[in-house]
Image (spheres, grey):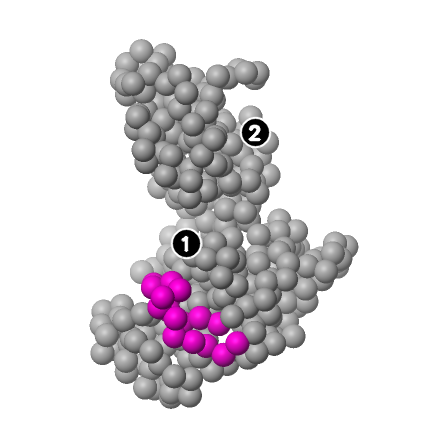
Amino acid sequence: MTMWMVRAGQGAGYIEEFEAHSVVAVGWADLGDISPGVAREAIIQQFHDSGFASGNRSKVAAGAGQLWRFLNEIAIGDGVVSYDPNARKYLVGEIKSEPTWSPDLMEALPRARRVEWQTSVSRDALSASARNSLGSISTLFMIRDDVADEIQALGAGISELPRQETLVESEPQPEDLFDDARARGLEFIKDRVTLMDGDEFEELVAGLLRAMGYKTRVSPKGPDRGQDIIASPDGLGLEQPRIIVECKHRTKTSMGAPDIRSFLGGRHPDDKGLYVSTGGFTREAKYEADRASINIALMDFDSLVEAIVENYENFDVEARALLPLGRVYWPI
């Protein structure tokens, strides 16, 4: 079966809409409605006319190629997957319609195809070579046959698969290779963090805060009264700002509004709050944080890894031992 990856916008921000509305969709809304059958060259010209990517020829060609494939190459009956980074799972389904112009559904992603979502597959269940090939940042691309077979088998409940754990180089995609390599690297860092237990995860977050200039105190095991870490200038929590940190390392469980309310209970008015969740947060949780009486920041898995990469040069020996990373220099 031909199988496609269609990403749910930047950072998979529309994955809930994909699942709720049973669709996959792509953007480039500024181009307006484009009918299937329009020549690829004409689409490229529309990209140029719109000023997309400041006329960067490789980015224009990549975007136009992906849009043309969505309109013309994807067929009814093809398989399709889309990645949910918070749940660390790939939604797996089947294309059920031709493309439609549907800005009322998702304004930023107005070109949609109806999908019957059938199952989901955990990223952690896939072989390393499959994870590597799915790490491309392309909005849309055709999945390799062997990876499509693996996804289908796992979706059908077949867990014992022949594995080739050696990372293989996937076919080059027509976009900026630096961004692609960086996106793959971030996903591999998330894979490594996922393997940590709860105590290691708390120590990693504490290491990040130390790299950002704070001194930290990690709560001992046992009831922590809603605080896993206290970060402050003096390390004792006596000087401001005092940041109370809650860490939840549950990659398949999003934190909800009750979790945020529980965390906020008993906080001092001058406290700052940081809630770190590898499973992300529900919309209700984000609303609860926005209306909280104290300043509270929510850090999901993507934000955590971005912060780790940004501050890794300042990590101390203990934090680096938890998550060893190497710098790669790339011509730009």
Q: Secondary structure at mark 1?
A: loop
Dominant secondary structure (helix, strand or loop) of the stretch shown in magenta: loop
Q: Which residue sits at x=40%, y=60%?
A: 9
Indicate the amino acid at tag 2: Gly
Q: Is residue 249 above or below residue 219?
A: below
Q: Which residue sits at x=23%, y=69%?
A: 54
Place of residue 46 in the rendered image (x, y in percent of width and height, measured from the top left): 28, 80
Nearer to us of marks 1 and 2 is 1
Q: Which residues are magenta?
A: 97-113
Q: Residue under label 1, please give it.
A: 13
**Quick one: quadrant of the C terminus?**
bottom left
Q: Is residue 141 left or right of residue 51?
A: right
Q: Which residue sits at x=43%, y=27%?
A: 261
Q: Is residue 277 left or right of residue 149?
A: left
Q: Is residue 320 above or below residue 87?
A: above
Contact (CB < 8 A) between labels 1 and 2?
A: no
